[in-house]
Amino acid sequence: MTRKIISLLAAAFLAVIPANAQSAARGADAATPKTGFRFVVCSPSNAKLPNPLYYQAGKEFKSVRIGGRTPSPRIKPIGGKVDFWDKDPAGEQDDTKGKAKTKVAAPTTPPVLSVTIPASAGSKGLCIVVPGDKPAQSQTFFMSESDFPARGIHLINFSSSPLQMVTSQKGDFSDKKTSNIQAFKRNEGITKSNSWSYQGENGDIVAYMLNSPQPDSKEVKRVKMSKFVVSNRQAQITVVVKDPKSDALRMLSIQLTD
């Protein structure tokens, strides 16, 4: 019964995007690198990237599906960047295994998306992709896995509004702890000021309220009130964005495992 309750609480915290969201790369195999970058889509407008995409891995091109919620397998940059094509540059595709085995030849078409990896991103990290009208117009944000380990609960504020996280281990907020999370600034990227983390102990159940303080007022607007459960097997990353249509704050979930 306890396990069932914990599972339901975890599902409640994560159910901020449709359950049938795009899954991660299907072209992964045993040779998936242990260093490199994983890619995941976070889109306030529900825009998507073409699927599958193709990238160079050593002497071949492989296919990968980059969607929401679950990051792709790691991809090693080449020359400080990762290029993606919407068609197999090798001109041959194995539909069964989802990857091309043809030796690399110079692509005759330019990539539809080229992601430059910043030096500050380290050797292992997550790239959050916000798709544009065209893949090349997509925005990318990087987080180092040393700053956001694959355990615990993390929140990143990508909105232009400051946030307030109130937590309670008792559940009734008599022991509440309040943390202020600053608005996102593109020139600063993801920092400790615009993000929040709770690692705690495996199995911890913590009640929380996510609020949005109102400008020129002491009032706060409730964004979400629920509970989260800490797991040593994965990190739960919630990205807060503004819906471009309604201007309301949305919470998009990412599950990150080691």
Image (tube, grey):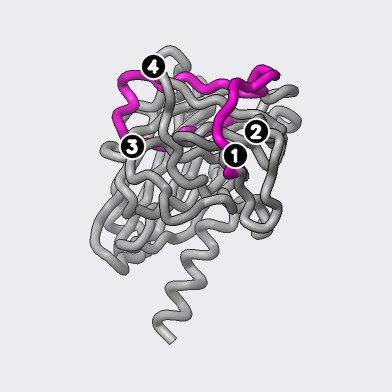
For marks 4 and 2, the one nearer the N-term is: 2
**Could you tell whether 25 is left or right of 92 in the image?**
left
Q: Amino acid at mark 3?
A: Lys
**3D distance between C-alphas at marks 4 and 2:** 38 Å
Residue 249 visible at all: no
Label 4: which secondary element: loop
What residue sits right under mark 3 in the picture? Answer: 124
Contact flag, marks 2 and 1 (Cβ < 8 Å)? yes
SS class of the residue under badge 1? strand
- Crowding around mark 4 (Cα neighbors within 10 Å: few <14, some 14 to 19, many 20+) is few
- The residue closer to the viewer here, 133 or 199, is 133
Residue under circle 1? 102
Q: Is residue 183 above or below residue 155?
A: above
SS at badge 2: loop
- First in sequence, mark 4 or 3: give its number: 3
Q: Residue 78 at what x, y percent from top left?
A: 43, 24
For the residues marked 2 and 1, what is the alpha-carbon distance in whole angstroms?
A: 6 Å
Camera-side residue of 171 and 12: 12
Q: Which residues are magenta?
A: 101-129
Residue 188 marker: 4
Label 4 vs 1, first from the N-terminus: 1
Answer with left or right where residue 144 lies relative to residue 106.
Answer: left
Q: What residue is shown with label 2? A: 90
| Image position of 38 with respect to 235: above or below | above
The residue at the point 45 percent across, 24 percent down is 183
Residue at x 48% of width, y 36% of height: 57
